[in-house]
Image (cartoon, helix red, strand yellow):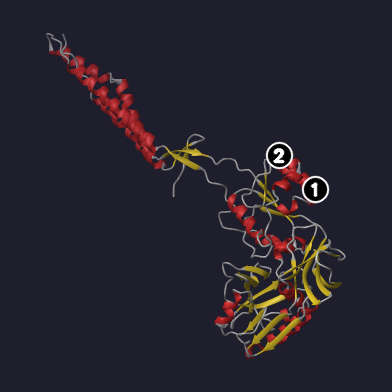
Amino acid sequence: MYLHLTLFPLLTFLAPSGLLALLGIAVPVAIHLWNRRPGRTVSVGSLRWLEATANRRLRSLKLEQLALLLVRIAVVALLAVALASPAWQRPPAPTRGQVFISPDLLPTGSLAAFRPGIDSLRRRGYEVRRLAPGFRLISAAAWRNLDSVAAAGATDSLPADQLWARVRQAADSFPNRPIRVFTSARLGHFQTTRPALPAQLTWQVVPTADSGAWLQSAYQSGPDSLRLLVGRSTEAAATFRVVRVRTPNAGEAVRVAGLSPLHYATTATGATLQPRDSSSAAVAASTAPLRIWVRYDAAHSEDARYLRAALQAAAAGLAAPLALTVSAAPPAAAASLDWLFWLSDAPVPAGWQQRVRRGLRLWQDAKAPGQSSEGFLANAGTVAPVRILRRSKEAVPATGQSLWSDGQGRAVLSYQSILQGSIYQLHTRLHPGWSELADSPNLPALLLDILQPEQKSTNWAADKRALDAAQIHPANHMVSVATSNRPAPDSYLDLRPWAVLATGLLFALERLLAQRRLSFSSTPAA
């Protein structure tokens, strides 16, 4: 540990004890006082004159060869300075605060109420950036015309599960700076585990459009009949309704209240419907029921009973009919399934694990005994808090995402995509000894959300469900690594090499002056 000594605003000594070597300056001074020139030889007639001259020389001591003495003092002083580790203190460059704005807010009028506050931050030196890969700067000219900002950032589509991770990346990219983040609170943006964020980060939730609607799925229930599942979302919850329409001719439009006209097309693989006024992907009209198999063992019989009831309740919100089998026996290897709920501590057969790559969706729950870990399910739209009593010991895979999480950001249900299929891991169980999920009236809606055909890439923009601001960035979660709040340390330029170089040059000069003195002293008087 260094004890710093600062003599000037920018010059400091990291080892000030080395300055004690300055006491060595007394050495050349003493040498100069001791080594005086011998007196001139004077021929006199009496020894009395010589004694008087010697006494006068002792009484009039004075420094001679002043230039040589000063050079020697400088050599000793520079050596002492070098021992004290001189350094030039370079304060860190002034840091500018950062404002990050989520791309989905730019093309809307949602920021209008917050522009005066952001303008005030800009006048204080804050930089405004997009909360998107690269964190591109929004210039003053572009900020005055938000339409151009939205057009320039049209490719900055924010994945539904990236907002927490993106803000963490922004905080890491601009450390030790005040940061303001402006985003919506839409649930689709917060599907991963909440990371620790620095305390100097302020997160402002911006209200957005109240509701949105989309076509979730379609089912060809007969030659002349279509069943459409239409989703509608508000900040509080997402709801679905089944609409029956007549099957139109190819190329005609299907009109549903609340949706833009749907273009109906037929291909070799089946019929599709696509909104005409959007870039959303076409929704295929399925012709087969949703096939689900629930396999359970003796220890999971109660879990299976709760799951059966929840799936049957969720089926009312599906466009396709539900073909549900609940059995203690595993399904036949040749069975055609969309979902396999594996409620057992026994491993899933290898054959069914391979089927995941070809489109099967596999559900597994926690293995006994688990560990005690109380928390509450923190998903939007829950009617009442759902207690989680025990959790599995397995962590979320590195490639997994959190779909349900508790108030501490820990995954309750995680999702891992594997080629065409996916694996869902429930980190607790439906058993009352593990959680209160079975008693929650919201369980069918939570299951319905994952049973729907995966349209996340196109429908998340219409999903307006919102998290509470305290769940996004609560006050008790604003702690990061210990160094997050420390100011940026000063940097130091080591001056020891320059001090040693100057010492060497002065020593060479000292030797030159000393040689000249000797040469002058040895020259005989004329």
Q: Residue at x 71, y 50 (%)?
A: 154
Q: Residue at x 72, y 45 (%)?
A: 149
Among the 4 quarters of the image, the one containing residue 59 = top left
Question: As displayed, is residue 162 above or below residue 70?
Answer: below
Counting other residues with Cα less than 10 Å from the Cα at mark 2, is it few (<14), some (14-19), or many (20 or more)?
A: few
Among the 4 quarters of the image, the one containing residue 37 = top left
Q: Is residue 25 visible?
A: no
Among the 4 quarters of the image, the one containing residue 368 = bottom right
Number of dots carrying numbers: 2
- Image coordinates for residue 3, horizontal then vertical, percent: 45, 45
Q: Which residue is mark 1?
A: 112
Tell me, for residue 140, which label it has, or none.
2
Q: Is 49 positioned to the left or the right of 294 in the image? A: left
Q: Nearer the viewer, residue 430 or 275?
A: 275
* Mark 1, secondary structure of its residue: helix
Q: Could you tell which of marks 1 and 2 lies nearer the N-terminus?
A: 1
Q: Quadrant of the C terminus?
A: top left
Q: Is 146 positioned to the left or the right of 419 in the image? A: right
Residue type of the residue flagged with mark 1: Ala
Residue type of the residue flagged with mark 2: Ala
- Image coordinates for residue 508, horizontal then vertical, percent: 28, 27
Q: Nearer the viewer, residue 42 or 276?
A: 276
